[in-house]
Image (cartoon, rainbow, N blue to C red):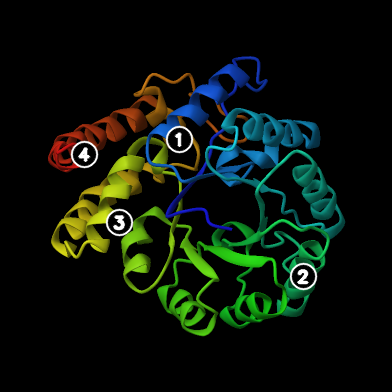
Amino acid sequence: MNIGRIGTAMITPFKKDGTINYPELERIINHLIENGTDAIIACGTTSENPTMSTEEKIEVVRFTVEKVAGRIPVIAGTGDNETAYSIAMTHKAEENGADGIMLVTPYYNKPNQRGMYAHFKTIAKETKLPVMLYNVPGRTGANISAETTIALSREVENITCIKEASGNLDQMGDIIENVDSDFLVYSGDDGLTLPLYAVGGAGVISVASHVVGNDMQLMLKAFDEGNHELAAKIHRALLPLVRALFAQPNPSPIKYAMTKLGFDTLDVRMPMMEMLPEEKAAFDKIWDTYQEKAKYFRELAIQ
């Protein structure tokens, strides 16, 4: 599954009554494709999938596939802490034309490594789609060890990549060193995009790319071309904005940030909460500072 360097974990826009705003979702899909996104992840954590019904999850994937219309890959987040439910959602994603699936570590029940291995292998065997593992111990309470990831990469043909959001570069390095070259390791943390890329990572599954996708692409392009000074400069400029995007629980800050680009995305579903006025004001200062710094990068991109 070739999903490029930057996949975006896409937000879900809601109307004031709490229902999904599908016209706005279509606008977001087109915006992402036009602004640095190589693949869309539908119904991941950033989509607020824990508050979405089964029917909504199925429809968001179907709608996204329809509106993307083959322009870039669509990966469906079908993972759950129940193996049977994950399989059922995977089958629905496959029926609706997804190009791959993403499977999060089982949360709350926190299986051991043997249980994780069995969970991922069992689901993967039920589909022909490529599988992305998703390791995010800060949310799930359980870490997929490097050894388990390496074993799955070798023993399950359609497990082809991992979104690694452990924040542990040592662990990520161990995976990269011990898997075949066609197994890809993506950062699940925007702030580690360049550090992981520099040691052999494939890119990032990003939240920030909603608003700075082109800047992130420029950073990785600069690194590829040997302009490490420019890549590092963009990385350092991005860090305060990335921290601001996660200063409050995701996706409230990115949904607020998207309103600055003209999108109707402010509403979140409880227990997520809209940012307070003082939180928005603090974000605005960092946003404005970044826009000033980014003028230089963006001028380079159009030369």
State which mark lies toward you, 4 or 2: 2
Q: Which one is earlier in the sequence, the residue at label 4 or at label 2?
A: 2
Q: Residue at x 53, y 38 (%)?
A: 10
Q: Does dot 2 land on a helix, a strand or a loop?
A: helix
- Name the disc covering residue 121, or none: 2
Q: Which one is earlier in the sequence, the residue at label 3 or at label 2?
A: 2
In the picture, the quarter occupied by the N terminus is bottom right
Mark 3 and mark 2: span between their CA atoms?
32 Å
Mark 1 and mark 3: span between their CA atoms?
17 Å
State which mark lies toward you, 2 or 1: 1
Q: Amino acid at mark 3?
A: Leu
Residue at the disc numbered 1: 33
Residue at the disc numbered 4: 290
Percent across and percent down for residue 140 are 63, 60
Q: Which one is earlier in the sequence, the residue at label 1 or at label 3?
A: 1
Q: Amino acid at mark 1?
A: Ile
CB-based contact (under 8 Å), mark 2 and mark 1: no
Mark 4 and mark 3: span between their CA atoms?
18 Å
Q: Residue at x 15, y 42 (%)?
A: 300
When asked about the image quadrant of residue 131, the answer is: bottom right
Residue at the disc numbered 3: 220
Instruction: Characterize the local packing of mark 2: few (<14), some (14-19) or many (20 or more) Cα atoms within 10 angstroms.
Output: some
Q: Which one is earlier in the sequence, the residue at label 2 or at label 1?
A: 1
Q: Amino acid at mark 4?
A: Tyr
In the picture, the quarter occupied by the C terminus is top left
Q: Residue at x 65, y 80 (%)?
A: 154
